[in-house]
Image: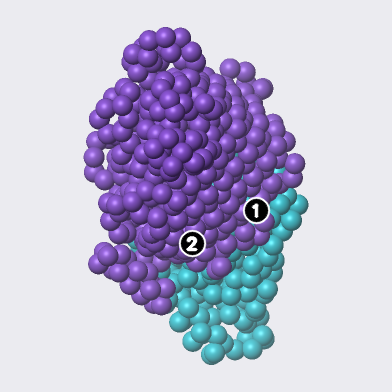
Chain colours: A cyan, B purple
Amino acid sequence: MPTAWVTLVLVAFVLAGSAGGVNAARDRMALSGAIRGRVDVRVAQASADRRPDVGALGISPSHIPPDRRRSVVYLDPAPRAAFDTREEPRKRMDQRNESFVPHLLAIVAGTTVDFPNNDETYHNVFSLSRAKSFDLGRYAAGKSRPVRFDRPGIVRVFCDIHSHMSAFILVFAHRYFAETDDDGRYRLDNVPPGTYTVAVWNETVHGDPPKRAVTVPDGGGDVDADFTIR
Amino acid sequence: MRLFRLVLSLAVSLAGGGGALFAQALPSGPVELGDGVVRVTGAVSVAVGEHDERAFFNYTDYEHNALRIFRVSLTGTWRPTSRLSFLTELRSEDVQRVRPYALYVRVRPWKSIPLDIQAGRIPPVFGVFARRSYGTDNPLIGYPLAYQYLTSLRPNAIPATADDLLFMRGRGWQASYPVGSTTPAPGVPLVSAYRWDTGVEAHLATRYLDVSAALTAGTLSNPRVRDDNDGRHYSGRVAWKPVVGLILGVSAASGEWLNGDLKNSLGSYASKDYRQQALGLDFEYSRDYWIVRSELIASQWNIPQLSPPLITEPLRATSGFIETRYRITPRWFGAARLDGLTFSEIRGQRRFGGALKTWDAPVSRVEAGGGIYLQRNLTLRAVVQRNWRDGGRVHKRTFVSGELAYWF
């Protein structure tokens, strides 16, 4: 578990305790800006083939290769306004063509994620992560089972039957995070004025995540922050 | 035993406290080269347990003990086009020489038809267990009796009389006969899970049916790289998948099993066919946190009737097992297997007072245990295995074994 996550959780609790009321939050939002940019991930794409299995009697169907170029950009630490509202939305991670779709999902703590099985075979979704350990068992096509994620952290999701299936769920204590789109672009809205550290999480990065300091001016407005990951 | 205690204490301490081992830090995906055209995976497992130099309940046909073995394997695929690939698995056991466990080419002739042809040292189509990936698919440490236990039959040496065979009851780990090679050597299991045969096979997969057939050089109990008797071995399996989670399969095989040199030395008996024939039924059902699997295999071997007291019937053996695995928590699982192996009866003169007796000693086995996923691809398992045998030097024996297995 990176130290950054521990820091994030601690800061979250401190700031949540000292945060002002809803009106104060609205005042701050009025002056807020946005941090936007692009994360250019220059790594080879994963193969669509399954894990080699010499015991198979034929070619197994290809699966959707995990998109390693997807990243999550977040503020570290988050501003006070991050903890003013508590949402408990629902998200979804499909099992389709023996792949988790999406391969990378960023959520706020308290979110419930549904895991529908859209294949004609069994899947067995599970995770051994400290942030959330769960095992949904084997269930057939058309069925779905939910998991609620309450602790911030990185949750690695696997299928017990198909070893080539894996996904990441990033659980944040605040709402200042964004997933990159197909072009690697992201946008963090409603960021109050101040200086922040913007960090990028990508599955190909081992060790400390790329970071840079960004200042949102008092008058608000858009601020650019681009990243390159090799 | 000391090493086993070490592994066990490691498991207990990890279960109680966790630690860095619990984080998914080990690589879990294949190594890819050339944009994924070449992919390499591997597996390492080390099983520790007691020595077994008297009962030989878990000896394999490579003379290793399945409950205390160090195994390293590397699997590689080269897929130059979407319908052509080359596959191999190189394996070493107990730091001995590296063997090509699998080495074959896979072709899909028609893009729109899910028919695949494989040629080379290929996975067996008979039954299920021998095709399973050991590290991820075997819920226990030991193997089922049908796929591992060495009967007293040998392809290169045969008994002249029924008494010769009865003398070897329960001694499949080192059988010796007067005809053929007189050097004592291990017998064969019903189906070998430790060696794959060489030949060609075809497999057609549909939503509800899997059909496969193979033509190979050896037999189920004695797979071979090179044909040694000019015989052909035919095998096939049909599996029905009526609903998701349920698989019902039926397999059959027939092949000439006696070694060519031995057969040629038999004079007038050499002109006959001496075949191993087998029939198999398999079943798998899984739901929620359970998997239940079962296989039943009946095999018979024909051998020449050389001298009285004659072995008048084909030598038959039947083996069946049922195993289950239950995932108790995301990390912990429990598993058990009930297993049996029995043989047909023959009558000797000197042995057993001329009474009917099974030609090899029937064996029963119960293996139960559990394990923990330290990481998704790092598993620690411990089992207790109890064996009963109606013959041989040792009739009962309990083994305890622990294993650490990693794959990527």
In the picture, the quarter occupied by the N terminus of chain B is: bottom left
Asked if residue B77 is positioned above or below residue B367 in the image, the reply reads above
**Amino acid type shown at disc 2:** Ala
| Nearest to N terminus: mark 1 or mark 2 | 1
> x, y percentage for residue B183?
25, 30
Q: Is residue B204 left or right of residue B74?
A: right
**Residue closer to the observer: B123 or B44:** B123
Asked if residue B372 is positioned above or below residue B261 in the image, the reply reads below
The answer to whether any part of residue B299 appears in the image is: yes
Residue highlighted by disc 1? B286
Task: Identify the secondary structure beneath mark 2.
Answer: strand
**Please, which chain is the residue tagged with disc 2 on?**
B
**Residue closer to the observer: B180 or A43:** B180
Q: For the residues labelled 1 and 2, say whether their Cβ atoms are less than 8 Å apart.
A: no
Residue at 57% over, 56% down: B324
Asked if residue B378 is positioned above or below residue B347 in the image, the reply reads below
Q: Is residue A169 left or right of residue A4?
A: right
Residue at 47% over, 64% down: B370
